[in-house]
Image: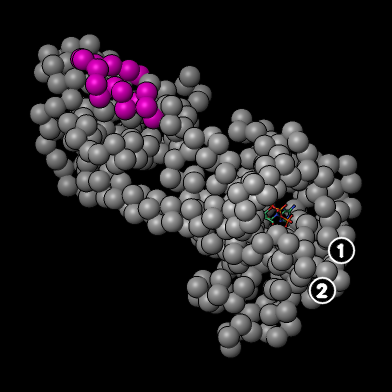
């Protein structure tokens, strides 16, 4: 906890996000210790609490109210209960609940003037995340797992085992709530937690969870490095136009694959899309090997990507009226106008859902 707060520059007002489960209840207990002392390493600190009621289970309001009163007894102040409506986002119920929860946590932090939000994720959560990512064939970014700090979200328990958070609850005489969905075999995450990890630890020896978490830590460094490089490369190549952006295809084609895929994903995000999965990225990247103009390939978040070949450019061939705006000279990200390169273009356009 101390290290997490120190590396975040000693936030003066922190918010503990607590479900009532063992991990975040232990987190609240440790944070309350610092609240009672009133400082961390001599830096003044106060600690508030928030409990989100997702309204997804019968009795969720009672669980939230009970958890809030435990937080108050621990000395957190003020403590809020936020009730959210979990809307379907098309990415599954767990992701929808997480999105709603994160929005509520950010809004509570704004409301309470908190400069840090503490989450109770543990080393076990990290290990499960890496294992699930491997099982899905994920890339570096996903296998890098959860960050100890992202924006004002901090995860001070990322190095702690789940059994240690249970111990903290026991020592503090706290009676954690056990979320039945954590053991629901309908969720891959629950099956990993309840059925897969214990077998791995038994068959491969203790320390498997630590090893998986270490993989995440190593890949975080690699992912950060590649992301920075891809960002720089993207900004040096992109030309933005009214309804999107384009990249000179020769330059993109010559990039190492690790950068090529990332640069394409960045272009999609830059024009307003969402992070594409690997299959969609492969389809977009394959446009670079097509003859003549090709596409569009649809990417998530209403983004179309297509290739305009040099011959079409010169002959003003089968270029659609809408696409032609992509040819007008654009300013690169640094604001300096560039001459169009002597090659085709990979064009990214965002289409508003209402236009479809
Ligand atoms: N309903 C909630 N209200 C407030 N914070 C929450 C809520 N659910 C989860 N969180 C926060 O997100 C973290 C991760 O939640 P998740 O459900 O993935 O983990 P968990 O292992 O079940 O954690 P816990 O034992 O704390 O419930 C929690 O430790 C907590 O900090």
**Tag 2 and tag 1, C-beta contact below 8 Å:** no
Residue plotted at (26% across, 32% down)? 246
Residue 48, quarter of picture: bottom right
Q: Secondary structure at mark 1?
A: loop
Spot occupied by residue 11 in the image (x, y as percentages of width and height): 56, 74
Residues shaded magenta? 281-296
Mark 2 burial class by Cα count in 10 Å: few <14, some 14-19, many 20+: few
Counting from the top left corner in percent of width and height, residue 307 is at: 26, 22
Which residue is at a point 45% across and 37% down the rendered structure image? 275
Q: Nearer the viewer, mark 2 or mark 1?
A: 2
Q: Is residue 286 magenta?
A: yes
In depth, the one of 258 and 325 nearer the eye is: 258
> Residue 175 — which label?
1
Residue 125 appears in the figure: no
The image quadrant in which ligand 1 is located = bottom right
Q: Residues within 10 Å of mark 1 (few under 14, many from 20)?
A: some
- Which residue: 54% across, 34% down? 136
Residue 171, numbered label: 2
Does 30 sit left or right of 42 as displayed? Answer: right
């Amino acid at each position: 906890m101390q290290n997490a707060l120190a590396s975040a520059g000693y936030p003066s007002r922190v918010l503990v996000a607590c479900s009532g489960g063992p991990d975040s209840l232990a987190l609240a207990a440790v944070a309350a210790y610092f609240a009672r002392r009133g400082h961390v390493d001599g830096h003044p600190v106060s600690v508030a609490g928030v409990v989100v009621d997702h309204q997804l289970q019968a009795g969720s309001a009672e669980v939230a109210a009970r958890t809030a009163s435990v937080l108050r007894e621990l000395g957190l102040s003020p403590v809020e209960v936020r009730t959210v409506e979990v809307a379907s986002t098309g990415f599954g119920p767990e992701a929808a609940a997480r999105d709603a929860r994160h929005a509520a946590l950010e809004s509570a932090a704004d409301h309470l003037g908190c400069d840090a939000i503490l989450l109770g994720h543990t080393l076990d959560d990290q290990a499960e995340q890496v294992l699930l990512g491997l099982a899905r064939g994920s890339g570096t970014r996903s296998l890098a797992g959860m960050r100890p700090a992202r924006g004002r979200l901090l995860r001070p328990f990322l190095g702690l085992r789940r059994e240690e958070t249970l111990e903290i609850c026991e020592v503090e005489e706290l009676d954690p709530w056990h979320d039945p969905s954590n053991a629901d075999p309908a969720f891959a995450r629950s099956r990993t937690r309840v059925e897969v990890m214990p077998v791995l630890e038994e068959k491969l020896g203790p320390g498997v969870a630590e090893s998986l978490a270490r993989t995440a830590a190593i890949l975080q460094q690699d992912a950060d490095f590649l992301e920075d490089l891809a960002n720089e490369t993207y900004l040096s190549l992109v030309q933005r136009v009214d309804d999107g952006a384009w990249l000179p295809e020769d330059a993109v084609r010559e990039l190492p694959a690790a950068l090529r895929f990332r640069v394409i994903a960045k272009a999609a995000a830059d024009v307003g899309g969402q992070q594409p999965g690997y299959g969609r990225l492969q389809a977009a990247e394959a446009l670079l090997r097509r003859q003549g103009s090709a596409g569009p390939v649809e990417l998530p978040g209403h983004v179309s990507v297509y290739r305009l070949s040099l011959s079409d450019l010169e002959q003003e061939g089968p270029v659609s009226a809408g696409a032609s705006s992509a040819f007008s000279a654009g300013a690169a990200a640094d604001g300096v106008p560039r001459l169009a390169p002597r090659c085709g273009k990979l064009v990214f356009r965002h289409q508003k859902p209402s236009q479809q």
